[in-house]
Image: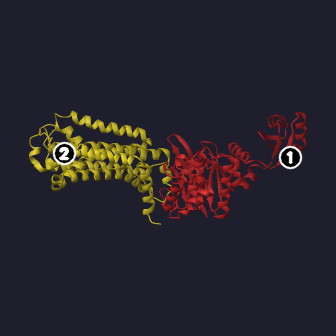
């Protein structure tokens, strides 16, 4: 069953087109990532899904219903906004207990969710006294109070340190495994999405450029990629580019992703160590088909632009 | 799950924020001080008009005078409180995104707005009227109790214009989502009316138009005729102007409710 079905959504702010004919679905129990650069339309899409924005065109259904001012849907969704705001002068535990009463769940759940995000020590603190990271954790606890079937999170880990990020992603996996909660997570931190997501929608310029299971997307866009790990990626990239069977080379701080003409993979395996020796670079590893999420994102965008 | 619970919890949360210590205590003190210190039981209403006062009975005029004297300072304090609550209670909640958080609760938009209004206006009004009526009952029961109609009418006419400004501030808040600007506009509008109503003393028409949104002027003219002798409204006109002013107030708020419920994109 699809929890979210969005068809041909469009939304403009004056002359600025934020979302244009965007379609996606989210199935029960899945963890779907919404990835894209700033201004791609992720937040606008999420707001339309949550019934905070009315689409100019298209239809969005959540649990089969229109989300605009729909209280039944709100009981089944947990929401984490990019910038979390709560009544500032209330204490964290007291406010969550209030939220428990709003959703008709036991007040003991308030402490449970605080513990889940490791915020129990701040239970007596006013919300305004929380740090940015703690506030984000609090927002996640707030979203989990009523054990929703679907959690929609916009840049959920934006304000968190790496350890807190990792812990939260564990919470996502745990909730997905144990409570079959589905997630729609928007993020620009791609490695963390690859850790938890089973599907990904790549959004760019207000449209879904690629959407599907991660494995399918890798197969579609990342086939024929060879990842070279080296201590001198930028110098080695310049050498690899000179090889006539190389279609595309992209490097980052940890290595180089190389796309070659079909059937030339073995040649690259032979040539790369020679080139490295020439420029005195150290090769740490060569792997086929091991593109990062970042790479997948770039490839999907490039493929679409070429079309 | 009952529908009342989320509403009451959002209301309690809004009250907690709008009246956190020491706001409620300070305003209650100011109301009480204003009510009792500014009470005046001498008839300082000087009739410059000719016919209006003749229409009103002496007892009604005395009751109007007593209520007006008790109203003066507390009404100003009430206005400050509701303007602050609309601008910083609703405006800042929209600006910061707290309304967005409320929208994740199983409560209709109009329910969230009603909870915010009950906190911003309802509690302030209860506090104001509670202390005023207590003051009147303690200080002048023999004047007030036989003239409850006049007392009610005086309050209704006096509160209409501040409520209209609050309604306009509410609409502005929805559009601008900036509490500070809304507060400035509200204060400017309120004082603009005080100045404008003092300018038109030659012809009744401008005053009649202004009275449709500020019926305390027509009441003042009816009981005291203090704005000049060019207009002597009948009691039915007082009621009509008061009624019209509340229809305008209701329309402004209804417009805001409809926009909030059906159109407001966050």
Q: Looking at this view, is A287 or B35 the one in front?
A: B35
Residue B41 falls in image quadrant: top left
Q: Secondary structure at mark 1?
A: helix
User: Is residue A150 visible to us here?
Assistant: no
Front-most of residues A56 and B44? B44
- The residue pinned by badge 1 equals A265
Instruction: State which chain disc 2 sits on.
Output: B
Label 2 element class: helix
Q: Which chain is red?
A: A
For the residue carrying disc 2, how many other residues have a C-alpha within 10 Å: few (<14), some (14-19), or many (20+)? many
Where is residue B189 drawn, in percent x and y?
A: 32, 38
Find residue B219 and name its label: 2
Residue B225: x, y in percent? 14, 40
- The residue located at (66%, 50%) in the rendering is A164
In this rendering, position of residue B183 left or right of residue A304:
left
Q: CA distance from mark 2 to mark 1?
A: 93 Å
Q: Is the same chain shared between marks 2 and 1?
A: no
Image coords of residue A151 (percent x, y): 59, 57
- Mark closer to the observer (2, 1): 2
Q: Which mark is residue A126?
A: none
Visible residue check, residue A123 = yes
């Amino acid at each position: 069953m699809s929890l979210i079905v969005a068809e041909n959504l469009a939304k403009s702010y004056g002359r600025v087109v934020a979302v244009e004919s965007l379609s996606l679905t989210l199935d029960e129990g899945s963890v779907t990532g919404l990835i894209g650069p700033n201004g791609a339309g992720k937040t606008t899409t999420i707001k339309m899904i949550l019934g905070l924005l009315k689409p100019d065109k298209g239809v969005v259904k959540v649990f089969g219903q229109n989300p605009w001012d729909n209280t039944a849907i709100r009981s089944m969704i947990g929401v984490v906004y990019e910038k979390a705001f709560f009544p500032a002068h209330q204490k964290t535990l007291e406010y969550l207990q209030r939220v428990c009463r709003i959703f008709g769940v036991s007040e003991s759940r308030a402490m449970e969710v605080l513990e889940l995000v490791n915020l129990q020590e701040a239970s007596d603190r006013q919300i305004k006294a929380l740090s940015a990271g703690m506030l984000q954790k609090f927002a996640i606890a707030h979203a989990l109070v009523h054990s929703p079937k679907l959690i929609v999170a916009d840049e959920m880990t934006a304000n968190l340190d790496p350890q807190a990020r990792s812990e939260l992603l564990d919470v996502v996996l745990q909730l997905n495994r144990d409570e079959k909660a589905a997630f729609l997570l928007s993020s620009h931190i791609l490695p963390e999405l690859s850790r938890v997501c089973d599907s990904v929608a790549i959004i760019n310029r207000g449209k879904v450029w690629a959407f599907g299971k991660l494995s399918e997307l890798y197969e579609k866009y990342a086939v024929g990629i060879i990842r070279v790990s080296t201590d001198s990626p930028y110098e080695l990239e310049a050498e690899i580019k000179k090889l006539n069977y190389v279609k595309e080379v992209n490097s980052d701080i940890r290595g180089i992703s190389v796309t070659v003409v079909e059937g030339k993979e073995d040649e690259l395996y032979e040539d790369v160590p020679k080139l490295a020796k020439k420029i005195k670079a150290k090769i740490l590893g060569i792997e086929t088909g091991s593109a990062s999420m970042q790479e997948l994102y770039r490839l999907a965008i490039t493929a679409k632009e070429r079309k | 799950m009952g529908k009342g619970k989320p509403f009451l919890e959002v209301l309690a949360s809004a009250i907690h924020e709008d009246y956190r210590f020491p706001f409620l205590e300070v305003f209650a003190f100011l109301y009480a001080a204003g009510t009792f210190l500014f009470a005046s039981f001498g008839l300082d209403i000087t009739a410059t008009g000719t016919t209006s006062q003749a229409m009103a009975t002496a007892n009604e005029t005395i009751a109007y005078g007593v209520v007006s004297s008790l109203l003066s300072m507390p009404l100003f304090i009430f206005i400050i409180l509701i303007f602050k609550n609309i601008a910083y209670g609703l405006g800042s909640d929209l600006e910061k995104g707290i309304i967005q958080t409320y929208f994740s609760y199983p409560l209709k938009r109009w329910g969230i707005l009603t909870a915010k209004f009950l906190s911003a206006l309802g509690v302030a009004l209860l506090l104001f009227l509670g202390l005023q009526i207590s003051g009147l009952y303690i200080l002048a029961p023999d004047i007030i109790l036989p003239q409850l109609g006049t007392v009610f009418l005086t309050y209704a006419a006096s509160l209409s214009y501040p409520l209209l400004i609050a309604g306009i501030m509410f609409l502005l808040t929805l559009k601008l989502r900036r509490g500070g600007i809304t507060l400035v506009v509200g204060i400017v509008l309120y004082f603009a009316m005080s100045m404008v109503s003092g300018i038109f003393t030659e012809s009744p028409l401008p005053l009649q138009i202004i009275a449709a949104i500020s019926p305390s002027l027509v009441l003042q003219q009816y009981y005291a005729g203090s704005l000049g002798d060019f207009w002597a409204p009948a009691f039915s006109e007082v009621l009509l102007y008061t009624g019209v002013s509340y229809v305008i107030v209701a329309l402004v708020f209804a417009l805001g409710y409809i926009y909030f419920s059906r159109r407001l994109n966050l």
